Structures are given as C-alpha cells and as structure tokens.
Image (tube, grey):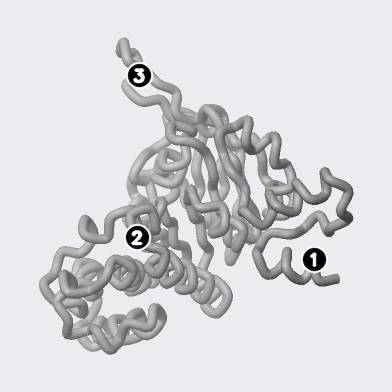
Amino acid sequence: MEFIQVEDMSHVYYPGQENEHAALKHINLRIKQGEFIAVLGTNGSGKSTLAKHFNALLLPTSGHCYIDGLDTLNTEELWQIRQQVGMVFQNPDNQIIAAVVEDDVAFGPENLGVPPKEIRQRVTESLQAVRMERYRKFAPHLLSGGQKQRIAIAGALAMHTKCLVFDEPTAMLDPIGRTEVLATVKRLHEEAGITIVYITHFMEEAAAADRVLVMDHGEIVEDDTPAKIFIKVDEMKRRGLDVPLAAEVAWRLRRNGIHLPQDILTNEDLVVALCR
C-alpha cells in the first residue's frame, strides 16, 4: 500500500521575485507503507524541501503530494496529515521545549486533546520504543545529543504517527550519538513497521535503507537499492557525493583485478568477501 504519493510536484521559493528559485522540479515518487527510504544529495539539491512537503510544512507550487490518500493542498486535511507524519530535525535542542523528559513527550498528545490516562500510556510506550524510559524524570539538558534526539523521536511517536521524516538527524552528533539514533530508527522500522524517510550526508546510514533516492538540482536522479546506488562510485563522486568506505574499497579492488561481489556495503561485508 502506498503511503506517500507525489505527482508532478514542483516547489518555487519567492515566485515572481528577483530571487525566484525552483527548489523542486516535477517530482514523481511513490513510498509504500513500512518502507525505509534514504535521501541523498548535496546542499541545495532539494532534500529538505521535499521532506517538508510530507507533513505539509510546505505546500506544492504545482502538482500534488498525497499522504495516505490525503491531499496536502486541502487545508481541511492538514491537521490529520500532521498527526500521521512526524518530523525530526538536525538540532534536538530546537525541538525539546519542556523542562522534564516525560512532559516533552506528552506535549503533542496534550495539544491534540488526548485524555490524560491515554497520554500517560503513550508517553510510556514511546519512551520504551526508543529505550529512554529510565530517563523520563530527567531534565533534557542533562542528556547527551543522541539521547536528546531519541527523546525528539519519542515525542513524534506519541502522536501515533505512521511515518517519521528525519532531516539529517545525526548531523550534530558524535559517532556514539549517530549509532544510537540510527539503531533506534532501524528498530522502529523493523519492529513497529513505521515508514521512514531519512535524509543524511552519512553514506553508511543510507546503506541501512530499503531504497535510496539521490537528488540533484531539485530532481530525483536515482531511485534504487543501496547496493545498486553505491556501486556507481564514479557517478556519485561526480555529483559531489560519497559512498560507504567499504563499497569504495571493494570498487578499487575490483578495478585491480580482485573478484568481489557487487553488493558490498559494510565493513563486515568486505571482511567476509576478502576472507573467501
């Protein structure tokens, strides 16, 4: 079942003005319920603009974006769309507003008018899902960057969202924080079946997705599995992008006559292939 449908969608910033800029150009895209999609592209390629259409933070200049059959251009459906799609941004400090973790997670459901008993249940379930329940009484400023980002994810989950859109959620985190957040995202996808749209500059993170979209100058120029995307090392580098280190090492070894599988993405894959 398709959860997100984008039909011939364009987005223009400052239309009719001197600094008019077409950020998206005739995008067509289908994302099924439960898929994990990674989105890659250099700065200015349109990644964040595309993501903000998925919960109607931005609306199409032309074309349509449908979320679970709801048209984002229909103002009467905006509230329902935003309950189904949660967004997590780069800086968790900009998303955490309460002085206590459990109050922050409860903020969204409270604004929806959810009964207090159900709010408490949602807070518990959401914190358990990101493995942060033991911190429910903590002040957020005492947590690490990775822990704060997991609290931001819990806040979105408490809204009972079907889809989570991550806009470079690990960009400001250290390697430990990045590992924590990606492990949480993968678990929510695999165990809860949540649809994931994950924008990142880290190729090893993108390799965890079911599909990878590559954007360039407001267009989707590649849409395929990670293995098929990352084997195109020359093409990716021409676009100003990288590939996972293991994929590049395998590519260089193949060019030097060593026969290795085409689907090497991780260090583990590479070690196994070399040992064989």
Q: Residue at x 54, y 44 (%)?
A: 40
- Quarter containing the N terminus: bottom right
Give me the C-alpha separation between circle 3 and circle 1: 54 Å
The amino acid sitting under disc 1 is: Leu
Give me the C-alpha separation between circle 3 and circle 2: 36 Å
Taking the image as shown, residue 55 lies to the left or right of residue 135, namely: right
**Whether label 1 touches label 2, CB < 8 Å:** no
Res. 40 mark: none
Q: Residue at x 37, y 85 (%)?
A: 128
The amino acid sitting under disc 3 is: Pro
Residue behind mark 1:
274
N-terminal label among 1 and 2: 2
Number of other residues with Cα within 10 Å of mark 3, as a class: few under 14, some 14 to 19, many 20 or more: few
**Whether label 3 touches label 2, CB < 8 Å:** no
Identity of the residue furthest to the left in this view: 99
Res. 15 mark: 3
N-terminal label among 3 and 1: 3
Residue 182 versus residue 162: which sits nearer the camera? 182
N-terminal label among 3 and 2: 3
Residue behind mark 2:
173
Number of other residues with Cα within 10 Å of mark 1, as a class: few under 14, some 14 to 19, many 20 or more: few
Q: Residue at x 57, y 58 (%)?
A: 204
**Residue 132: quadrant of the picture:** bottom left
Taking the image as shown, residue 56 lies to the left or right of residue 238, namely: left
Residue 133 versus residue 192: which sits nearer the camera? 133
- Position of 33 relative to 63 (above/below): below
Taking the image as shown, residue 135 lies to the left or right of residue 24, namely: left
Give me the C-alpha separation between circle 1 and circle 2: 32 Å
The amino acid sitting under disc 2 is: Leu
Task: State the SS at label 1.
Answer: helix
